[in-house]
Every structure is written in C-alpha cells, then in structure tokens.
C-alpha cells in the first residue's frame, strides 16, 4: 500500500512560509497604524501654535512620535507575545530552548534603526537650521534674566510719540541716549512683539543660568553667564502668551515668568511702547515719584525677593531678601553705623554693589543689576520715604545731571498754544480798533455838523 506524504505549507524561496509573511505584513500594518494614532493624538494636549517655528517643530515631533509609537508597540507586543507563547506549561520543569545566531535578524534590527536615526538626523538638522537662521528685516530685542525676573530692551525713535520735542528740554539721560543713533532705550517687564515680524532675542543673565522658553512659540534657549546667546522666532498669531524660565535658578524659580503680547501691527506695537517712552521723556520732577514709578514697573527683580507694603499692589511679595518696610529708619541708624556711610550712601551702595554689606541673616544672592545711575538715585529717593512716619529721616542729594525741572514741553504743543494766543490777541486788538473807530466817527460827524451850523 502506497504511503501518503503530508504536504508542507508553501514556503517562499527565503524559507519563510506564506502564512508567516502574511502575519508579518498584518502586524506591520497594525504597528504603523498604532504609531500614527499615537503621533496624531498626543499633540492635541500641546499649547496653541503661535509662531512659524512652532509648526516646523511640531511636524518634526509628529514624525518622532509616530516612529516612537511603532517601536513602543513592537517592543511591548513582542514582550506580551513572548510571555504568552513561551510560558511554562503545567508539569514542565525542564529548561527552555536556547536560540542564537540568527544573522538575518541581527542585520535587520541593526539596519532599520541605523536608517531611522540617519533620516531623523537630516530632518532635525533642516528644522534646526531653518529656525536659527537670520531672517530678513528681523527686529532685535535684548533680554536680561535675573533671579527672578525678565526685562526687555528696545531701541525706539522718539517719533513714536507722534509729536515734536525740544531735545534740549529732555532729561539729560535721554539726551545722552539720543546722541548715539537718535534712538531711545526702553525697558519693559513685558515682551511686546508684532504679528509676522521676525524677532531675534539677544540674551544675557545677570547672575546664574536661566532659560528663555515660550511654549506657544516652541523655542527655548539658555542664558549663560559671560555669553550673549540668541533665539529667533516669528509670531503668527496675536494674543497673550507666557514666557517661563526653564532652568532651575533658585528659590523663586517658579515665579520667573513674563507676559508676551503679540500686537497685530506696527501701530499697535508703537502704542504699547508709548507709555514707557513717555515716562522717560516726560518724567515727574519729584525724584520720589520717579523712584516709585520705576519700582512699580517691575523692570528690575526687586519685587521677586523683597517685600514692601507700599507696593503690595505691584506684587512686591518676595521672601528671599530683607523686608524693605522701614528701610529708611534702619539706613539712618543701624546700617549707617555698621557701614560708616551716610544713609543715602548706604542705600546707593546696597543697589549698586549689593555684596559690599550683607544684612545679617542673608547671603550674597542679589546680583549687580546694572541699573542706570540716575534711576539708582530715584530709587534711593523713594526708599528714603519708607520710614515709620512716612517722611524721609534724611536728605537725598540728587546729582545735577539727574535732576528734572519738569515735564519736557512739546514744541508742537507750544507752537499751537502760541498760535492760539497770537490769533486771540490779534482778534481782540482788531475788535478794539473797530470799536474805537465806531466811537470816533459819530463824534467827528457831530463836530462837523456844529461847525457847519455856526455863523
């Protein structure tokens, strides 16, 4: 009787059965579909895209998520399958089979990651090169980071005020600033930018390493002591966004935030900076008022470390440095005695060289902030009023170059006032002359009539 030989499943020329190939294809499709699902679903929890760079970064991240999703599902799938397929059966006590030496598999799992990493390197370099390359017509803004505060410097023309000024009547500091390039340096605690306007940030820290990070723009760059670092972005959505420090920099690191406002156009951008410039070109004559105005603006990090009840509405609730309530009384007594300086010299030194004298119980945490000379004296004048009585217990001598006689008069306003006064005076004079003529004419007529009637 002839024997019947069992039929083996059809195998390809490579020795792999058709069933196995079909399973691999199906599993591969499921892995890719799962990776795409992970890549598309995860970014839905990200912040809104508010810059041209954010779209490039997110597109690259989508690719990374898809590939990462495929790898994750593959690894976890093989793990679950191996646990199920090669589990010990009831009653089995022998060691499992040892398998090794599959050259084909080793080539595959080496080649695929190598090609993947190479492709990702090329894509990442293209995105990096695109978002860091200089853009045509970009605006330069300087950013200063200090524990625990941001401030931003703009170089702006006086013309944004929309009126003419007599330069000789402006504060001396403003006149000196205009001499270089006819631009005035404005310092703001808020970052103002324009929709569609490329921006390059030139950044320096005052103390330790900080990191400039605007999640909605998808840009982040460290500020490194002793270096000027840059970051570029082009906002493409108006609104308000948040800038955060992404580098642990101290006790109040979590509070080191700033507001980013994207204005719709240049007109709105100039209007946002006008109040800052007005405080420079038309400052109050009283240095105490100027000092309070400066501290309330939060352009310097004083409020993040000190507490001052008089400025509590400006968020002066820091707890890292000494409390400034009654600082004028202490400057005039214990601090002056300890340092051998006059009260105003002590306050001046405490701002300009904060480590020269340390208040007992506090370390050398305060950096040199580079505050302009005249602004330092304005702050000293204001702090001199922070006493128990509310009156300055000592006199602050403001240097002549920092004194302000009053708000700078606008030449345009002066011309209008002069023109109005001249017109009014001319009208009054003309009216008076007409009235006088009217009064004289009847008298002359009467005299003529009497002369004619006389014999």
Image (cartoon, rainbow, N blue to C red):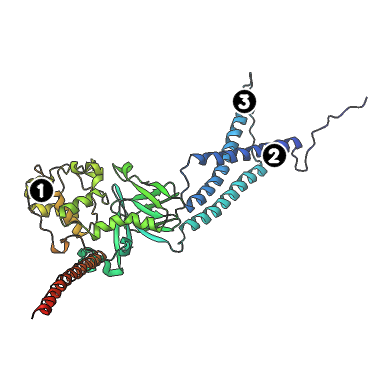
Secondary structure at numbered mark 3:
loop
The residue under label 2 is 25
Residue 395 placement (x, y as % from top left): 8, 54
Q: Mark 2 or 3, which is nearer the eye?
A: 2
Question: With 150 as the anchor, is 132 left or right in this view?
Answer: right
Rendered image: mark on residue 184: none
The quadrant holding residue 23 is top right
**Could you give the CA–CA distance between mark 3 and mark 1, rounded to whole angstroms?**
79 Å
The reply, left or right, for residue 354 in relation to residue 178 is left
Which of labels 1 and 2 is toward the front? 1
Q: Quadrant of residue 445?
A: bottom left
Q: Residue furthest front?
A: 455
Q: Which residue is mark 1?
A: 331
Q: Judge whether 184 appears above or below 369 on screen.
A: below
Query: Can you identify the residue that label 3 sits on?
Result: 87
Mark 1–mark 2 CB contact (< 8 Å)? no
Q: Nearer the viewer, residue 99 or 274?
A: 274
Please say whether residue 416 is visible from this viewpoint: yes
Vertical relation: 452 (above or below) 339: below
Q: Residue at x 33, y 41 (%)?
A: 254
């Amino acid at each position: 009787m002839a024997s019947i030989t069992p039929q083996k499943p059809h195998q390809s020329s490579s020795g792999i059965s058709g069933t196995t190939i079909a399973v691999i294809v199906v599993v591969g499709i499921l892995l890719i579909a799962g990776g795409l699902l992970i890549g598309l679903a995860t970014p839905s929890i990200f912040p809104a895209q508010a810059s041209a760079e954010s779209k490039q970064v997110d597109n690259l991240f989508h690719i990374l998520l898809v590939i990462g999703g495929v790898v994750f599902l593959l690894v976890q799938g093989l793990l679950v399958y191996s646990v199920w397929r090669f589990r010990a059966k009831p009653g089995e006590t022998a060691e499992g089979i040892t398998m090794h030496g599959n050259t084909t598999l080793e080539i595959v799992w080496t080649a695929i990651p190598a090609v993947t990493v190479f492709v990702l390197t090329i894509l990442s370099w293209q995105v990096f090169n695109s978002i860091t390359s200089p853009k045509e017509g970009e605006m330069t803004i300087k950013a200063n980071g200090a524990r625990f505060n941001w401030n931003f410097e703009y170089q702006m023309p006086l013309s944004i005020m929309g009126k003419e000024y007599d330069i000789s009547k402006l504060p001396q500091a403003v006149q000196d600033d205009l001499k270089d390039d006819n631009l005035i340096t404005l310092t703001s605690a808020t970052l103002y930018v324009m929709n569609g306007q490329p921006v390059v940030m030139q950044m320096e820290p005052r103390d330790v390493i900080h990191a400039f990070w605007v999640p909605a723009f998808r840009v982040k760059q460290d500020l490194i002591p002793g270096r000027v670092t840059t970051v570029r972005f082009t906002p493409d959505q108006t609104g308000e966004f948040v800038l955060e420090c992404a580098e642990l920099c101290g006790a109040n690191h979590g509070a080191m935030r700033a507001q980013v406002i994207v204005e719709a156009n240049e007109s709105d951008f100039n209007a946002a900076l006008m109040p800052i410039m007005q405080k420079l070109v038309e400052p109050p004559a009283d240095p105490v008022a100027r000092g309070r105005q400066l501290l309330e603006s939060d352009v310097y990090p004083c409020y993040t470390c000190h507490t001052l009840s008089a400025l509590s509405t400006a968020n002066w609730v820091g707890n890292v440095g000494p409390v400034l309530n009654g600082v004028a009384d202490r400057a005039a007594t214990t601090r002056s005695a300890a340092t051998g300086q006059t009260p105003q010299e002590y306050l001046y030194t405490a701002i300009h060289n904060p480590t020269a004298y340390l208040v007992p119980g506090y370390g050398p945490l305060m950096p040199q902030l580079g505050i302009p000379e005249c602004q330092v004296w304005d702050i000293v004048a204001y702090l001199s009023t922070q006493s128990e009585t509310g009156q300055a217990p000592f006199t602050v001598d403001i240097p002549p170059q920092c004194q302000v006689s009053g708000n700078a008069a606008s030449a345009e306003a002066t011309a209008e006032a002069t023109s109005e006064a001249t017109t009014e005076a001319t009208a009054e004079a003309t009216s008076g002359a007409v009235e006088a003529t009217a009064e004289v004419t009847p008298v002359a007529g009467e005299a003529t009539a009497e002369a004619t009637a006389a014999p």
